[in-house]
Image (cartoon, rainbow, N blue to C red):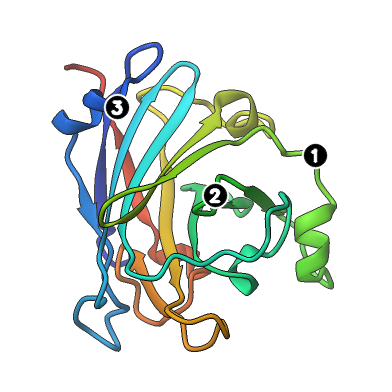
Amino acid sequence: MHDRFQIKVAIAPENPEPRFWESVDGYGLSCSTDEGGLPLEGAEVRFAWNGKGLYVHAELEDSFVVATSRSDEQLHFETGDVFEFFIKPLDDDYYWEMYATPFGNKSTLFFPRDRAGMTTDDFLKKHTFHGVEVYARTTERGWAADMFVPAAQLTALGADWCGATEWSVLCGRYNYNNDTLTNPELSMLPPVSKMNFHLTNEYARLVLQTEG
């Protein structure tokens, strides 16, 4: 078994303000290990948690922000720039894939334990997990997104949400730099072995802090 990349998750106040993130460790996105190196336009992600759920804050460099869809529950990687967040119980087989776009649209795909024969459309539509909250804005260097995953979603299938629970995650990004939506730059955290966001056995381990 390979050693998992670990991500420290800070303790969040009841309602985190923007300045809160200044004191939280950030983690940069990179290319997959088979490609090596860093993306031309970087991104940094920070994590925090409390009893209400998980908070994810992403700041993304982007010289050409594009997103042609303004609807939720879409495959946003087909329609423009997107930040993707995957979360999975460390010792179970189901997981979620959630999106944030530069204009605040969101989507959730759910991959159940038994998914033989299911299609991408099934993962997008055949579930009831729509509680993720997304806030996004443009910045001088690109755009930023805040994502909140409620504890009610994370615990819906029997997992716990406390300092002793173990979760694994991956952050991914599609960064388009043209109106034709071709040749996106892909990056990720952690850097898994191939450019594939679904290598769940290589996801990073979340370490939920219990002391300030």
Secondary structure beneath dot 3 equals helix
Pointers 3 and 2 in contact (C-beta within 8 Å): no
Quarter occupied by the N terminus: bottom left
User: Mark 3, mark 1: which one is toward the viewer?
Assistant: 3
Kindly identify which residue carries mark 2: 103
**In terms of sequence position, does the residue under pointer 2 or pointer 1 come before the other?**
2
| Coordinates of residue 111 in the picture (x, y in percent) | 69, 56
User: Mark 2, mark 1: which one is toward the viewer?
Assistant: 2
User: Spatial distance from mark 3 to mark 2, Cα to Cα?
Assistant: 18 Å
Kindly identify which residue carries mark 3: 18
Residue type pointed to by label 3 = Pro
| Coordinates of residue 203 in the picture (x, y in percent) | 40, 59
| Coordinates of residue 73 in the picture (x, y in percent) | 73, 52
> Quick one: label 1, few (<14), some, or many (20+) residues within 10 Å?
few
| Coordinates of residue 79 in the picture (x, y in percent) | 63, 70
122 is higher (above) or lower (below) than 205: below
Q: Which mark is residue 128?
A: 1
**In terms of sequence position, does the residue under pointer 3 or pointer 2 come before the other?**
3
Secondary structure beneath dot 1 equals loop
